[in-house]
Image (cartoon, rainbow, N blue to C red):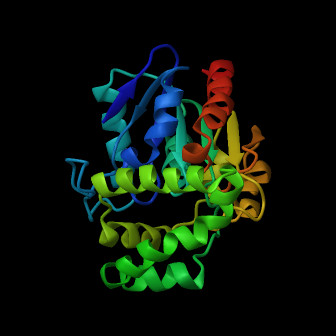
Amino acid sequence: MFCAGSGRPLIVVPGVQGRWEWIRPALDQLGTRCRTISYSLCGDFGSQRRYDPSRGFESYLDQLDEVFEATGTARAAVCGISYGGFIALRYAATRPDRVASLILSSSPSPGWMPTAIQQAYITSPWRGTPKFVLTSPLRLWPEITTAFPTPAARLGFLARHGLRVAAAPMHPGMMAGRIREQQTIDFRPDCDRVQSPALIVTGDPGLDRIVPVESTMRYLDLLPNAVHARIPGTGHLGLVTKPGLFARAVGDFVAATV
């Protein structure tokens, strides 16, 4: 578990890879602005908590309950990163007393469908992982070249992020299972139940090759109290390519709503 900083509490739910370590630059920056907490999703190597098939998606809500309790947090802003947005959304819909505000960063909206490339990985996650990992820099290259102006800066980022990923390995089977499960759940009723103010964070249209910006932007219509913040020069990786800008947008929102 990650816990740093002081002041207003913010709990960050990681993306489909499940590891908080992958977003460490953003967490470090957020920790200078508020009490920032994050963790690894249940079922992953670093979570020390198994995923309960009998509970299904509710396992992630049970785990978030435990995070609140373990950190002595009664009420907080909850931020979902990408797939983690589904967890944060349902938590805000079902635990309004605990969620002061909701942040969804590059999160797919209800009805999102994986691309053909993503679907191939979901179908054979363990066999497809080497190719998926090796081709990721190519898919993300337009965003990386926009965020970093020089070849040295781009390679430096790839090296640093690669080390974070290697030190906190993902669980391909769990990742694929999360997407398969998400495809069976209708999250639209959850949007109607959210009472807290919401911040929708995206990068620039066209640069997010993982979750289209237009999908994330749908939350502005689905959530009654939602506002938008764009991290310029980024796509899906803005919280690690430009963590200072990400932390400023999120930190200012937390300060105003918690």
Q: Tell me how many marks there are.
A: 0
Can you see residue 41?
Answer: yes
**In the image, is 83 to the left or to the right of 141?**
left
User: Is residue 194 placed above or below 36 in the rendered structure?
Assistant: below
Q: Residue at x 80, y 52 (%)?
A: 221
- Closest to the observer: 53 or 210? 210
Can you see residue 84?
Answer: no
Quarter of the picture holding the C terminus? top right
**In the image, is 87 to the left or to the right of 59?**
right
Q: Residue at x 25, y 48 (%)?
A: 47
User: Is residue 5 placed above or below 146 in the rendered structure?
Assistant: above
**In the image, is 57 to the left or to the right of 220?**
left
Q: Residue at x 73, y 60 (%)?
A: 213
Image spot of residue 172 (x, y percent): 33, 70
Q: Residue at x 76, y 65 (%)?
A: 206
- Closest to the observer: 26 or 194? 26
Image spot of residue 158 (x, y percent): 49, 56
- Closest to the observer: 209 or 217? 209
User: Is residue 226 placed above or below 69 in the rendered structure?
Assistant: below
Image spot of residue 136 (x, y percent): 51, 70
